[in-house]
Amino acid sequence: MKYFTSRLALFPFLLVAGTACDGPPARLVAGIADTVIVNNERPVKLPVQVLDSHGSVLPDSAVRFRWNAGMPVSVSPTGVVTCTGAGDATVHASLGSLSTNLLLRCRPVTKVLATRMMNLVVGGPSQDLPFEALDVDGKSVTLLTGQVTIGDSTIASVQGTRVRAVSTGQTGIEMRVGNRKAFTQVLAYKLASTPEGIRPGEHVAVNVHLLGGEMRSWHLAASRENYFIAMLPDGDEQSMPRLTILGAACSPGLGPYTFFCLARTDAKVIVYHPRDVDPERRLSGALAVWRQSWRE
């Protein structure tokens, strides 16, 4: 299971804390269901909250901690823990007569990678976050807690571990896990009937559905700006039409079926149903075109 929280989601919690009249401590709350995931390689304080009977957050400086069982882990009396390897331990937290045992799940992350850029269609399906977290041996870490930040929330938004397009344009997305982070770009397209006549700075996507022997083509005007051209799957990539570009100098983009192209003369984009695929099999996808501008 993965847990992600956008930075914006943290602010309501900070604003609520301390706004009610403080009562005596009533309970200790640790992480999620008394489970704390630590992806940091460096020392980090365990997130334990002290609540009164009304659920208001009280100061936590008097809470004391000690290692209890499981994998040996360095835990200071004030709750600073250092995870030097992967494993599980229990930690005892106490404040006067209140106490709880929390499950500490050490999963230190040494690197976060952006696996691709994101191409999203406004009104289309959301996509999984395109990041991978690795441990010291280069193996994938799947038990994570972290923050995801969208540069411009008017263009894209994060819902759990999924990203969806809000409006057309481009922005960045950053994922921070422990003390590591990675960044990639998000392109959001509006649905259109054709990419022909696209203006600098515009992002458009055309839905395509083809049976055997069918193809569709469009002309792109000569331009001093680059075109970014991509074929986006409608679910399974194996059920997506193929793409070819004529009359432009193209190089691979930052993901499969994506290209950066310079068209010094008029170019043609062709989407087709390949001969080696069952002609009765319907192929579906979206042709996405972004005409860059000098200002971007």
Image (tube, rainbow, N blue to C red):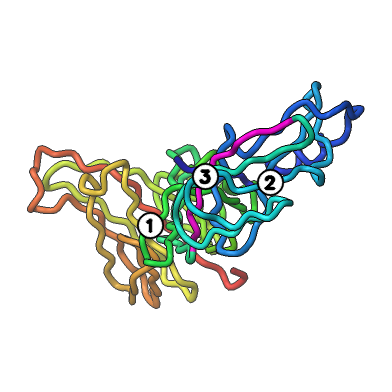
Q: Under tag 2, what secondary structure?
A: strand
Residue 150 point in image, percent of width and height? 61, 52
The boundaries of the magenta stretch are 98-109
Q: Under tag 1, what secondary structure?
A: loop
Rate crowding at label 3 as few (under 14), some (14 to 19) or many (20 or more) other CA atoms within 10 Å.
few
Q: Which sits earlier in the primary sequence, circle 2 or circle 1?
A: 2
The answer to whether the residues at label 2 and label 3 have Cβ atoms under 8 Å apart is no
| Residue 81 lies in the magenta stretch | no
Residue denoted by label 2: 65
The residue sitting at the top extreme is 53
Amino acid residing under circle 3: Ala
Quarter of the image with the C terminus is bottom right
Amino acid residing under circle 2: Phe
Residue denoted by label 3: 69
- Magenta-colored segment: predominant secondary structure: strand
In the image: residue 211, left or right of residue 21 = left
| Residue 107 lies in the magenta stretch | yes
Whether 250 is drawn above or below 91: the answer is below
Does the image show residue 104?
yes
Place residue 28 in its image quadrant.
Answer: top right
The answer to whether the residues at label 2 and label 1 have Cβ atoms under 8 Å apart is no
Q: Which mark is residue 267?
A: none
Rate crowding at label 2 as few (under 14), some (14 to 19) or many (20 or more) other CA atoms within 10 Å.
many
Amino acid residing under circle 1: Ser
Rate crowding at label 1 as few (under 14), some (14 to 19) or many (20 or more) other CA atoms within 10 Å.
some
57 or 162: nearer the eye?
57
Residue 131 point in image, percent of width and height? 45, 56
Q: Which of pointers 1 and 3 indicates the residue nearer the eye?
A: 3
